[in-house]
């Protein structure tokens, strides 16, 4: 059979058979040839880690017996402050420093004078000088120090309230003590208020009760709630007794204080009367004393000593008793 007589299917089969034969021959030749390509190992090798270099950061390596393993410091470092904030802070410090310097040194803030309110006997000049802040900067003045200084220098001040106001004002409001007793002792005299505090007389005050001290009065107790208050010169109870006793003192007599018998006076009728120092029963003492004097007038007798310190047991002494004792003493000599 000639090629012309072959069908197309037969021709295709012959071509495929030819290609298969050539492929088998080629595969046989490759199997008999030696290996040319290198054999790749299946052993896995750890890749080298890649490190990124960070500016201004320190790295710490620790040998742990394993290659290519490193420990890094934890990233806790604060980010650096920008330079602009540093310049801003420096500028603020300079500005505030200049402001403080001007506030302390500029004469505009210096106190030229002090406004004093509530004073009656004390002058404004005396109070201003005692504060010690004239000409100082208003920012250096402490109101508490001003109040303490005035209370220590002037015991006649019952209370002091100081306040500072910009730019250079200092206000001081005071309350003065009111004297009730004119205490005279050892050729000197002082004023005493109703709490027993003594202070220097200043000016003229009407209606004071004069008392002559033959001895120092019992000292009073300073109040616990007023740390800067001066200690009382006399007990408050003694001052209360003086106030209650004053209305019955004869016009021609002067009340005095005796360390033994307390308050009393020398009556122009020839006797000395004593009432002690207690004020709570002074009204009863006065009634007992008036009853005794009326009884003496009716009996036409004249005592020389009357003591009603204890009104339930008054004591008096007649002139005959006093006259007898000196005669006995003279006869015994």
Image (cartoon, rainbow, N blue to C red):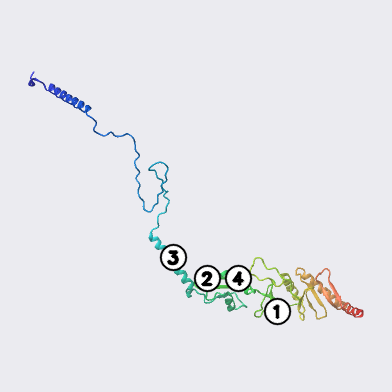
Residue 58 x/y as whole percent: 40, 51
| Quadrant occupied by the C terminus | bottom right
Query: As rendered, which of 272 and 328 lies closer to the eye?
Result: 328
Circle number at residue 93 = 3
Point out the tag, 3 or 4, that comes first from the N-terminus.
Answer: 3
Q: Residue furthest top?
A: 1
Circle number at residue 148 = 4
Residue in view at x 47 percent, y 71 percent: 103
In three-dimensional space, the C-alpha distance between marks 1 and 2, rounded to whole angstroms, equals 40 Å
Residue 282 x/y as whole percent: 77, 70
Residue 310 x/y as whole percent: 81, 69
In three-dimensional space, the C-alpha distance between marks 1 and 3, rounded to whole angstroms, equals 61 Å
Point out the tag, 4 or 2, that comes first from the N-terminus.
Answer: 2
In three-dimensional space, the C-alpha distance between marks 3 and 4, rounded to whole angstroms, equals 36 Å
Closer to the eye: label 3 or 2: 3
Q: How many marks?
A: 4
Q: Which residue is mark 1?
A: 189
């Amino acid at each position: 059979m000639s090629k012309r007589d072959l069908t197309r299917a037969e021709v295709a089969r012959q071509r495929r058979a030819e290609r298969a034969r050539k492929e088998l021959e080629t595969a046989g030749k490759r199997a008999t040839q030696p290996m040319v390509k290198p054999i790749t190992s299946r052993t896995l090798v750890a890749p080298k880690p890649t490190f990124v270099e960070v500016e201004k950061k320190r790295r710490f390596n620790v040998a742990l017996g394993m290659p290519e393993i490193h420990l890094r410091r934890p990233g806790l470092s604060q980010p650096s402050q920008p330079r602009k904030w540093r310049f801003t802070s420096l500028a603020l410090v300079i500005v505030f420093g200049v402001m403080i310097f001007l506030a302390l040194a500029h004469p505009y803030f210096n106190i030229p004078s002090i406004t004093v309110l509530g004073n009656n006997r004390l002058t404004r000049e005396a109070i201003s000088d005692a504060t010690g802040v004239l000409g100082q900067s208003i920012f250096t003045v402490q109101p508490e120090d001003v109040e303490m200084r005035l209370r220590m220098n002037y015991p006649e001040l019952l209370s002091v309230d100081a306040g500072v106001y910009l730019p250079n004002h200092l206000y001081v409001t005071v309350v003065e003590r009111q004297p009730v007793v004119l205490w005279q002792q050892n050729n000197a005299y002082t004023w005493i208020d109703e709490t027993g505090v003594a202070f220097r007389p200043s000016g003229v005050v009407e209606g004071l009760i004069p008392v002559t001290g033959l001895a120092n009065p019992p000292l009073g107790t300073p109040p616990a709630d007023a740390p800067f208050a001066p200690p009382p010169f006399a007990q408050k109870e003694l001052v209360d007794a003086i106030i209650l006793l004053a209305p019955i003192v004869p016009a021609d007599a002067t009340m005095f204080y005796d360390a033994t018998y307390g308050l009393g006076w020398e009556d122009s009728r020839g006797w000395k009367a004593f009432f002690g120092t207690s004020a709570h029963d002074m009204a009863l003492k006065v009634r007992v004393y008036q009853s005794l004097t009326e009884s003496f007038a009716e009996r036409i007798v004249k005592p020389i000593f009357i003591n009603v310190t204890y009104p339930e047991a008054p004591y008096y002494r007649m002139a005959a008793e006093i006259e007898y004792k000196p005669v006995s003493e003279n006869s015994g000599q």
